[in-house]
Image (cartoon, grey):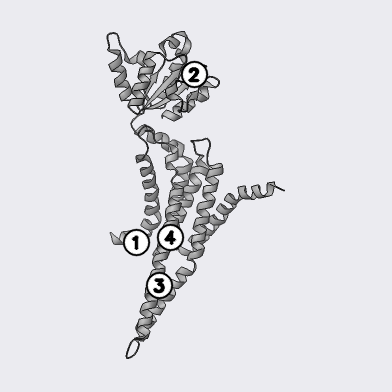
Amino acid sequence: MRKIPSLLITLAGPIGTLISGIALVITLREILHPPDYVFVLLVGFIGVLAGIFSKYIARTARKLQAAPRVFISYSRLAHAVGAVSVTQRITDELRRHGARVWLDSEQLHPGDPVLPKIREGIEQANALVLLLSDQPGQFIKTELELAMAKGIRVIPVLLSDVPVPSELQGIQYIDLRENSEKGIQDLVQAVT
Amino acid sequence: MNDFLATSVFRYFIFPLASVLLGIGIKTASRNDRYVAFRKEDIAVGLELMRTACLLFVVLTTDKALALVRLSRDLNDSLVAIPSPDMARVRTLQEQAQLLSAKLAGAGWMILLLFLSLWSVSTIVRKWGWRSETEMAPLLGITLPLVFGILMLVVVMAGASQ
């Protein structure tokens, strides 16, 4: 018996929508003259198409917009022992969705001043993706400080069981430990 | 220009379409710079359109009510005119007052209908319009409110032009 009120509350929305939808159509039929229906139907049809194909419209609009720029921050030590494939997968997936990715292995060449180049990369970025696979080293801390000082969005990504740095305690992270596919998709969605 | 603004094409096609596009544009332009990309949720401006239609109708109804008050006053002045009332003017004013009264008679129900639509569609969006915490469902989250928003704007526009 207790379920009846909650069922009524749940159904109130659809019932109300149905009633009001019918009433709106009846009102329109009374108010409008026959040729005007065509315009209303046309604009309503455009609304339906825009809603149903909103995903594709957004994707096309994103392509027309300036591409998001992402700075990838990761531990070189972890990179050396196996996180390389994850970093590459993330980079590839982000690029596939139109993002411009800054990766030190591609951007830093022998003889380049490291810190100024990193600073430049972070300053031009819309987001910093921080791949956490071990205790953050000095470079990661510096990159994090630079990004936070510039107000750039930081997205922590957990690759292994490692404590999240205290500076990132209040920021929602993406977990790649159990389901890396979903995690990467979440990251792509968050960034692009 | 004024003629064009009074046409059905403008009232029932360009105006609602422009309202949708303007809503999407404002949503995109006011987005936090840190989240640069356009998302499908930016197209979800239906509830904003519905709210605008509701408030617009309330304002238009108030205008009509005030016009009716003015008409009644003019009618009263005409009836007590000395030496004798101008019957032609009285008749005109009376017809106008009847017309406005007829329009206002259904306004209460219309306000109820518009706010019922707004509430029920909002409820559907809240319960079934979200796929995840940040992603909306295309059909119940975006399309349904958009179609209702367009319909409500057209109803209000049509009512205002009568």
Q: Report the label total.
A: 4
Q: Nearer the viewer, mark 1 or mark 3?
A: 3
In the image, residue B64 above or below residue B28 = below
Identify residue type, mark 2: Pro
**Other residues around mark 2 within 10 Å, as few (<14) / some (14–19) / many (≥20):** few
**Disc 2 from disc 1: Cα separation:** 65 Å
Instruction: Work out whether disc 1 and disc 4 sit on a shared chain.
Output: yes
Q: Which residue is mark 1?
A: B6
Instruction: Give SS at disc 4.
Output: helix
Residue placed furthest toward the bottom:
B83
Q: Nearer the viewer, mark 1 or mark 4?
A: 4
**Disc 2 from disc 4: Cα separation:** 56 Å
Q: Chain of mark 2?
A: A
Instruction: Work out whether disc 4 and disc 3 sit on a shared chain.
Output: yes
Identify residue type, mark 1: Ala
**Disc 1 from disc 4: Cα separation:** 18 Å
Q: Which residue is mark 4?
A: B57
Q: Chain of mark 1?
A: B
Q: Nearer the viewer, mark 2 or mark 4?
A: 2
Instruction: Work out whether disc 2 and disc 4 sit on a shared chain.
Output: no
